[in-house]
Amino acid sequence: MATINLLPWRDKRREEQQKAFGKFCLYFALLGGIAAFGWSQMVASDIERQDQRNAMLKTEIKQLEAKVSEIRTLKKERDDLIARMEVIQGLQGNRPQIVHVFDKLVHTLPDGIHFSSLQRLGDNLVIKGTADSTSRIPVLMRRLDASCWFDQSRTPLIERSEGTTKTFTLNLKITPPDKVTEDGTNPSCVDATVKKSEEVAAL
């Protein structure tokens, strides 16, 4: 004899399907949460590594900046040292020249003329002096013209006269010969010297 199931089997089946669907959603949510947590951890790890790289780069940049600053300081010190050496070499190179210039000035100075001041501006000399008479100044000019060490830029300026004494200003340009021996002479440049007796006779 056949049996008839009078229970609401459709409702029971629907209930089982709903439970299965709920379990599936729960599993899916759990899997999504795990994936999101893993992804966030991976992103956080990447950010941490990038922060470490940035910190390392900042440290390296600071070290490089310190080295660059040190190099600039050393370069400035080197340039200052080179400039000082050039000044010292220039002074050492000009020292014999100054000795020769003063020696030539002494030898070209006639009797009756006295230098009161000498001022050097580069290769120019500004000389102030006094002369017993106006006729002695041309003698000084001829001697300076005869020297290879000087070039007169203009004629002497007589500023004032006090009796026979004349105060004058003379502008000279230092023009040393190309080759000068230790005694200040040059084979191709021989200073012409006017005999003192002829000068005295001319006065």
Image (spheres, rainbow, N blue to C red):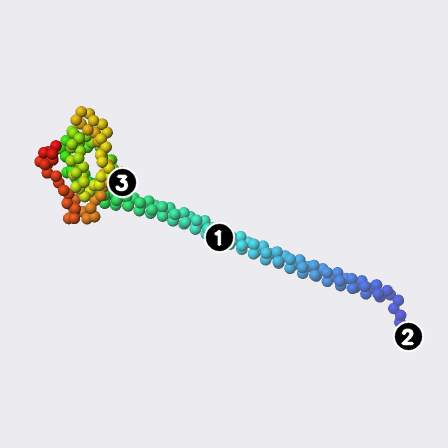
Q: Which residue is mark 3?
A: 122
| Separation (CA) of disc 2 from disc 1 | 89 Å
**38 is higher (above) or lower (below) than 190:** below
Query: Residue placed at 42% from the left, 48% from the top?
Result: 66
**166 is higher (above) or lower (below) than 173:** above
Residue, far top: 163
Q: Position of residue 190 (x, y in %)?
A: 15, 45
| Separation (CA) of disc 3 from disc 1 | 54 Å
Residue 170: image quadrant is top left
Query: Residue placed at 18% from the left, 43% from the top?
Result: 148
Observer-nearest of 31 and 170? 170
* Circle number at residue 200: none
| Separation (CA) of disc 3 from disc 2 | 142 Å
Amino acid type, callout 2 = Met
Q: Which residue is mark 1?
A: 57
* Circle number at residue 1: 2
Observer-nearest of 187 and 74? 187
Disc nearer the start of the sequence (3/2): 2
Judge left or right: residue 109 versus residue 37: left
Observer-nearest of 170 and 33? 170
Q: Secondary structure at mark 3?
A: loop
Residue 137: image quadrant is top left
Q: Secondary structure at mark 1?
A: helix
Disc nearer the start of the sequence (3/1): 1
